[in-house]
Image: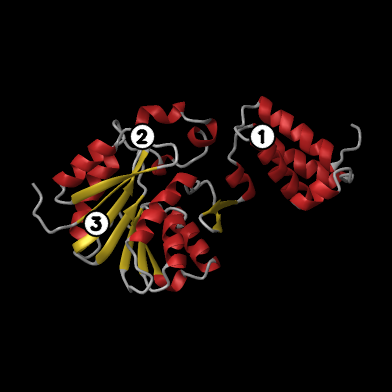
Amino acid sequence: MSEQTLLTAWQSARDRLKQAGVETPAFDARLMLEAGAGVSRMDILTDPHRALNAQQAQAVEKLVARREAREPAAYILGKKAFWKYELTVTPSVLTPRPETELLVEAALEQLRPDAPLKVLDLGVGSGAIAIALLLERRKISMVGVDKSAEALAIARFNAVALHVADRLELRESDWGADLPDAEFDLVVSNPPYVRHGAIDLLAPEIARHEPRLALDGGRDGLEAYRALLPQVRRLLKQGGGFLVEIGEGQAEAVWAHATAAGLSPEGVRNDLSGRARVVFGRNLGRAPG
């Protein structure tokens, strides 16, 4: 094999990832090269003809092969950017999505910077949503619940790394069923909402590698909402707000389930592609039914 340089290694990785169907082959090739060779983006730009030694070349090859097999870049690198920070992620947690930042934005609109409110994150996963809110609103405290002990361990690690662990209580729980009534000012959730039969039709990065527990919304994709929205009604203080992320085409059904649970939906937020992404509303204290 001829000697590889930063440029030729990147070009080769890019071409392989493109052939494998990776959505962003040039970007992902750079990430694998940086991690494997221990170089920076600036190194690649300013010294593209720098030769890789055998150890670097072997390390890059291993990472590229994993990405070529459609393992998510976040799991290969062990990290994922979200909001304004970087999270540690593993296959035990869903990779944070850019569209979930819309849920963070909408939640921040309901959390005044000076208000010492109590917020609940149902299905905390890696801690992405909870940590973003805690970093932006220094007066709030939060509880994050998840069914997965492995996910809670990752959330705890991220909370410590980002210095918000003192304001985030993490609990293993089934949609907060063991939490006290009327304790929270705001509840947020990004629950599983993919139809069970559609999971295997998703991109290989998701279908083969991401945790099914965090994806599978049951036969119609709405199973989690039927379980969690009555809990949201019970857990919210009167007048408290809720925000839930939804999948494509689910806004009307989630709105109906929220109403049936005794909540008062108020609106829907669309993402940048125009798709309904967040249903929000309040607990106005009406009895369910």
Q: Residue at x 50, y 57 (%)?
A: 154
Q: How many marks?
A: 3
Please, is residue 204 above or below residue 55 in the view?
Answer: above
> Which comes before the other along the chain, label 1 or label 3?
1
Q: What amino acid is labelled 2 in the image?
A: Glu
**Percent x, y of residue 134:** 43, 66
Q: What amino acid is labelled 1 in the image?
A: Pro
> Which residue is label 1 attached to?
25
Secondary structure under badge 2?
A: loop
Secondary structure under badge 3?
A: loop
Q: Residue at x 80, y 38 (%)?
A: 9
Measured Cα–Cα span from mark 2 to mark 1? 26 Å
> Which residue is label 3 attached to?
177
Secondary structure under badge 1?
A: helix
| The N terminus - image quarter | top right
Q: Nearer the viewer, mark 2 or mark 3?
A: 2
Q: Look at the image and name its color scheme.
A: secondary structure
Whether residue 253 can be seen here: yes
Verify CB contact (< 8 Å) between mark 1 and mark 3: no
Q: Residue at x 45, y 54 (%)?
A: 151
Q: Is residue 192 left or right of residue 41?
A: left
Q: Quadrant of residue 107?
A: bottom left
**Percent x, y of residue 162:** 53, 66
In the rendering, which numbered label is found on residue 248?
2
